[in-house]
């Protein structure tokens, strides 16, 4: 039985699967980068990790990101806050 409705359904399901396969990794990468939420607890952890770093250009860049995150938080820009805090956290984990 070669029913056109079944072909349409299969085509739609295939397109949905392809769209998911393309979009899911992009969203996961975006969440990974912004994985640090803008909260007092995350600020404390990130600031402590940055403070423990050896004085070098990476530490100074991380300190700037913490400062930018604080400014963003004060201006209710939560996405920017999380992004800057995430960058600082990533830098503090770099070896």
Image (spheres, helix red, strand yellow):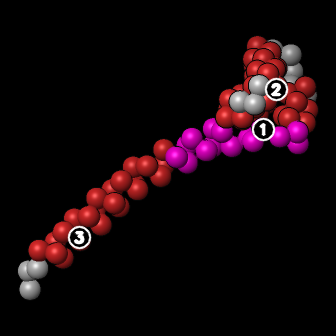
Q: Residues within 10 Å of mark 2 (few under 14, many from 20)?
A: few
Percent of width and height locating residue 35: 69, 43
Q: Residues within 10 Å of mark 1 (few under 14, many from 20)?
A: many
Percent of width and height locating residue 16: 34, 60
Circle number at residue 38: 1
SS at mark 2 in the image: helix
Q: Which residue lies at the image location 23% right of the left edge and 70% below the top edge?
A: 10
Tell whether label 2 touches label 3 (CB within 8 Å).
no
Q: Which residue lies at the image location 90% right of the left edge and 25% below the top edge?
A: 51
For disc 2, the marked residue is 74
The answer to if 26 sits in the magenta stretch is no
The first of marks 2 and 1 along the sequence is 1
Percent of width and height locating residue 17: 35, 61
Please identify the quarter of the rendering in which residue 65 is found: top right
Please identify the quarter of the rendering in which residue 36 is found: top right
Q: Residues within 10 Å of mark 3 (few under 14, many from 20)?
A: few
Instruction: For marks 1 and 3, give the CA distance.
Output: 43 Å
Percent of width and height locating residue 54: 87, 21
The first of marks 3 and 2 along the sequence is 3
- Provide the residue span drawn in magenta: 27-41
Question: What secondary structure predominates along the stretch shown in magenta?
Answer: helix
Instruction: For marks 2 and 1, give the CA distance.
Output: 11 Å
Whether residue 94 appears in this view of the structure is no
For disc 3, the marked residue is 10
53 to the left or right of 77: right
Q: Which residue lies at the image location 78% right of the left edge and 38% below the top edge?
A: 38
Q: Pick the quarter of the image with the N terminus.
A: bottom left
């Amino acid at each position: 039985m070669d029913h056109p409705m079944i072909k349409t359904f299969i085509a739609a399901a295939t397109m949905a699967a392809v769209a998911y396969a393309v979009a899911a990794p992009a969203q996961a990468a975006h969440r990974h980068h912004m994985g640090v939420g803008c909260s007092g607890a995350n600020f404390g952890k990130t600031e402590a990790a940055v403070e423990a770093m050896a004085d070098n250009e990476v530490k100074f860049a991380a300190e700037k990101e913490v400062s930018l995150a604080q400014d963003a938080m004060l201006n209710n820009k939560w996405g920017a806050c999380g992004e800057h805090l995430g960058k600082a956290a990533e830098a503090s984990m770099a070896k």
